Image (cartoon, rainbow, N blue to C red):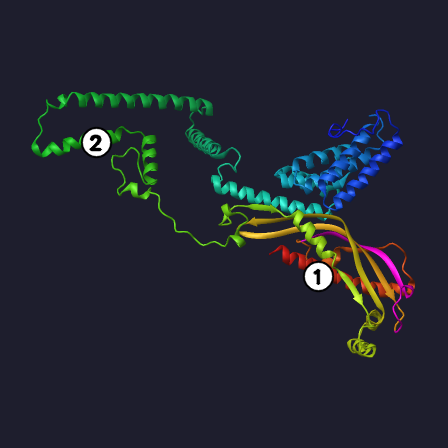
Amino acid sequence: MSEHSNDFSDSDVEETVKVEECVSEANRLKEQGNAAFKSSNYQLAIDEYKRGIEWLDKLPSKNKDHNGLKSVLHCNLSACYLGIQEYRNAINSADESIRLDSGDKKALYRRALARFHGGYLDEAKEDCQSMLADDADNSNARMLLAKVNEKLKAARAQQKKAFGSLFNKSGGLYTDRARETQNRKQHNYDEYVRKQQESGGEVLAMADGERLEEEESKKREAERIEKVKAEEEKKRNGGKDDDDTTDTPGDSSSSKKKPKQQDESDMDEEDQKIIQETKKMGYCYFGKNKPGGNLTTERTPQVVSPVAVDTATRSLSSWNACGTTYEEKDMSSWCRDVLRENLLMASYKNDPSDGDPSVNVMEMLSNINIDDSGSMERLQDLATMVHRSSITVKSVDDMECDAQIALIRGTLRYMFDFSCTLVFTASIDTSVGSESSESNATVYEGALHLVELSSAMEKGKTYSDYMKVVFKDSLKPEHKDLMGCMVDKFKVSVCECIDAFYARYQQ
């Protein structure tokens, strides 16, 4: 049983049902879910898809003939969850779809999208790379991978800024120190071997040399401690040992300086090195003199004068007014609705009967220079002007849109990519000079497929390069050239609608 089998119960479904009945009901519910999805009623679509899955779950587990249909239902569920920004559920539904059909590229893309929005950037990158391994020309995967890499780069930059790059290296600061110490030991041992070979002496193994060096170090440390104890004992006795000697008044200062000189000579090479390094840092912990100045005032909180920041152009949130932190806002739902609204307004119309026909014809002839090169194309343009023709959008179907406003290094970036189908009717009336009537016009039904249009198009391409026209019926031979000109002008109108959407998006 699928993970969705217990989410809904249908009282009309009996325990023992026919395969045909299950498949028929599943297909019916899938179509109802598709209709709800197109109208952006995602919750209703989720309910319908889940009920369809429940019907298929009634089939025996050994019957795998309809796993393809079940995979499609799970894939559609993933799209719905993306629409309501429930990314964890979107990932689970896509996983189930891929389990049932490992070749479902649409489910793989939706899982990558859900992982990207859900913050699973490394997993999203793996999905994108998998899609590109199968199809290097997959622009959806390429564009999503670019966004994933950009977000990963921003996250690493933020981490580096916060932690000073200590954790960007393998092992961090302490591993570097250990490596440095080991390299120094190896260098010293190599020098020791070279000197011993030159002098013909015995060469000890590095481990033996380190053991001897450690023993000598302990011995020196013990001697130093004994000397310190002796000095302390001498001070406690009040300098009785010096009473036996008679000093002149002029020698009293020199006698006072001797203990200090003796203390300095008692320090071994390692102690001297530590003191020198701390002095380079500006303050010696072992010294008696503290740095001058009033340290308290430097650590007193100071009032920072407020800086006027244009939060409308620098950030997405009030807490990020300076625009220094990476931030992203999902705009998919808004862009989907506005795109559909704008694309419904795309159209093409030419009616030479408007106004004075003779004036229209004169304007057409003045705009067309037959003597120029490309005369055939100009004649086609003239034919387009003479005939009454139009293209009108009936509906915008199969809209899939992904959009975000991202704040990257203080700059707002408006990103989007979408695919949809414009269902249209095209009318051609070649009866110039007569009254317009339905019988004189030839009407064609077609669809303009907008495939993977985005804010990051390939260099040298326009929106029109991502559009493809398909007609339901074959065109009449005398209408083919004319229809080609009509479609080109219609594409210009569609591009203008997309530009209007983008301008509104940036506001």
Would residue 130 be seen by someone viewing this image from the given angle? no
> Quick check: is 441 in the magenta stretch?
yes
Considering the numbered disc 2 on the image, is that residue within a helix, a strand or a loop? helix
Are the residues tagged 2 and 1 within 8 Å (C-beta)? Answer: no
**Secondary structure type for disc 1:** helix
8 horizontally vs 18: left or right: left
Task: Give the camera-side residue of 204 and 278.
Answer: 278
Q: Quadrant of the N terminus?
A: top right
The residue at which mark 2 appears reads as 260
Left or right: 13 in relation to 185:
right
In the rendered structure, which segment of residues is drawn in magenta? 433-454
In the image, is residue 217 part of the stretch drawn in magenta? no
Image position of 305 with respect to 376: above or below = above
Horizontal arrangement in the rendering, residue 81 relative to residue 372 (left or right): left
In the picture of the structure, the residue carrying the numbered disc 1 is 496
Q: Position of residue 184 (x, y in %)?
A: 44, 33
Kindly indicate the quadrant of the structure image that contains residue 233. top left
Which amino acid type corresponds to the residue marked 1 in the rendered image?
A: Glu
Locate residue 465, reporting x and y percent: 75, 57
In percent of width and height, residue 352 lies at: 82, 72
Query: Could you say which quadrant of the image residue 354 lies in?
Result: bottom right
Give the total of numbered labels. 2
Q: Distance between the Cα atoms at labels 2 and 1?
A: 88 Å
Q: Position of residue 281 (x, y in %)?
A: 34, 40
- Residue 407 vertical placement versus 194 (above, below): below
Quadrant containing the C terminus is: bottom right
Q: Residue at x 77, y 76 (%)?
A: 367
Query: Can I make out residue 243 in this image?
Result: yes
Q: Quadrant of residue 58?
A: top right
